[in-house]
Structure formats: C-alpha cells, structure tokens
Amino acid sequence: MGRHVGDFPLEELKGYRPELMNKPNDFDEFWKRKKEEINHLEPIVKMELRDFPHPGIEVYDVVFTSWDGTPLNGMLMKPVGAAKCPLIFHFHGYTGHRGFPLDYLKFTSLGAAVLAYDVRGQGNSPDYARYSNGSRVQGWMLDGIFEPENYYYTNVYCDILMQWKWLKSDAFPFKPTSIGLCGGSQGGGLALAAAGLVKCADFVIADYPFLAHFERAIDVALAGPYMEIVNFFKWHDPEYMKYDQVLKTLGYIDCVHFCEKVECPVMMSIGLEDAVTPPSTVFAAYNHVKSKGKSIDAYPQFTHEGNPFHDEKKLAFLLKHMK
C-alpha cells in the first residue's frame, strides 16, 4: 500500500502473475446470484433504422431497457439483409460513448455486424441506480463503493448480462455466427470481464484494459479514473481506514478475477508509457487469462492512446477468428 512512481521492466512484466489476494471468497456465488436474477427478466428493445450513406450497411438506433428500467442507448450495424454474420460487441472507454458508424467500417468491411452501447451514466445513457453515498469525487468509480450489490460497475456488468441474453435469443434481429468482445481502456476491461461472465464468447480484443488489478493500480497509476479512488483516500480517508472495504467491493468487478474463466482466443495490447492503465495491471490480467490462444503486444513509446500499427494486427486477428 502506498504511492509509487514507475512500473516494472518488460521482462518482469511478462512473468507478472500476482496471486488473487483481493478476490472475495464468495465471488462465484455473488455472480451466480446476479445471473439468476437476470435470467428471470426479459429485455425490452426498440430499434429504428437510420439513414446512412453506405449501400451495403444497415444502421439502427437501439434503446435497450435494462434490468432496473434504465434505457441504454446503442447502435447496431449489419450487412444489408444479412440473416447470419459474425457480431462484434464493442465497449467504449471511460467518459466516452458508443461512437459513430464510421468508426466501425473497418469491422463491417470484413462482413461483421457491430453492437455498441453508451454505458449507463455515460454518453447518452442515463443511470437509474440509486446510491446511499455520493462519490464525492467527480466520476463513477465511487458510486456505491461501500455496496457491492449496487456498486456502479456491478450494475454495468448486469447490463452486459442482460444485453448478452438478448443477442443470444431468437428475438435478436439476426443469428450471430460468432461473437467477439472488443474494446479499449474501460472497454477492454469490460470485454475481459464479460468474457469471464458469459464464458461462451468466441474471441476477445482488449486494448490497455482498465478495471484491472486495483490493489496495484491505485498505487502506481498517475492519471485517469484510478485517481478518483486515490483522491478519495487522500481527501476523505488519508489513513486508509476504509481501504479494505473499498478493495472488497472492487474485488467483485476486477477483470483480473474473471480472466481465469476466459478460454477463447484473446488479443491484448499495452503502451509501456501508459500512466492511466499501468502495464503491470494489464499484464496481471493477461497472465491470468486461461486461454492458450492468447497474445499481448507491448509498445515502448505509446501511452494511453490509439495505435494504428496494432489496429492492422487486430484486423488479421478478426479474420482468423470470426466464423
């Protein structure tokens, strides 16, 4: 415990596989119960075709009513008239949004459909959850931090379970021949956690994933969302009296704790100058992924940013694993 500057050298990162000291004893039971709650609910979905200047692509605005009545705003792109095709379920970064159709043409050019939502409370999606404590620091990291059952990211993960139920159902507008989970930063963490939650994704692409290895992240991150937790301790709990309570809640949603259940092919990346999602936290997730078909690319001069060189590798990965 305590703030440090810097991270491990690459050779040490490659073997960094920390023990899961912060994984709650009832982790599996907790998420089994959440899944059972979701299984009793039926998604309510409204879709509206929008104009898009591409003759081969249909674009729909989607409003998905989630488990607590929150209307999540999303977008579905698919090849015109396709009854079957691969599907990429894409998650956006922290404070971001689902993006624009042009952002996903690189995927649809390969014949894939794309489903993307504004995460609750972000983009144009509201958040109907109610918390007994405010975050006291701007952002979502601390909403419900003392309530594992109603923590912000617990609710986000339940949204994903609800969305997965829809896209695997007969009510979904086409039959996915394969389903990949993709995203960067927050989106990368959600993709890894979702893969562990549903256990039946066909592949995962996770760039510099957030929501990973919290006990180290809040020690070494120097920017970005982890700093909300750091600043909470600094200004409201300078002696870390509530540290164990905070880390227990985070333990239920730490994507590292889901990685042992991920057996599908996984492609990851990290910039070694990343101060937002420190490389050690990303390698902690990667080294806990159970899949033998996994790879991680480390880029020495990149920070927390897009990487066009890696984007080409991702297209090759998609061509290999989409069905």
Image: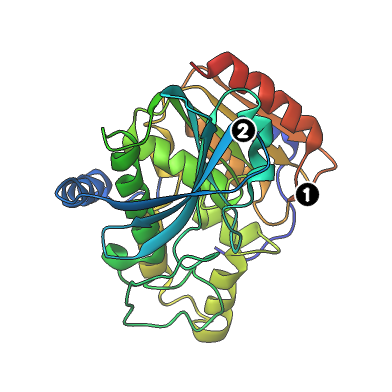
Name the residue: 54% across, 80% down: 137
Residue under pointer 1: 303
Indicate whether 285 appears above or below 277.
above
Q: In this image, 123 relative to 197: left or right?
A: right
Residue for point 30% across, 70% down: 147
**Mark 1 nearby-residue class (10 Å; few <14, some 14–19, many ≥20):** some
**Residue 156 locus on image (x, y percent):** 39, 57
Tag 1: amino acid:
Thr
Disc 1 element: loop
Give the camera-side residue of 131 and 28: 131
Q: What secondary structure is marked by label 2?
A: strand
Relative to 181, say whether 210 is above or below: below
- The mark found on residue 268 in the picture is 2
| Residue 125 in sight here | yes
Viewer-proximal residue, 46 or 247? 46
Task: From the top left corner, tell me how far across and down residue 124 is, in percent.
Answer: 52, 66
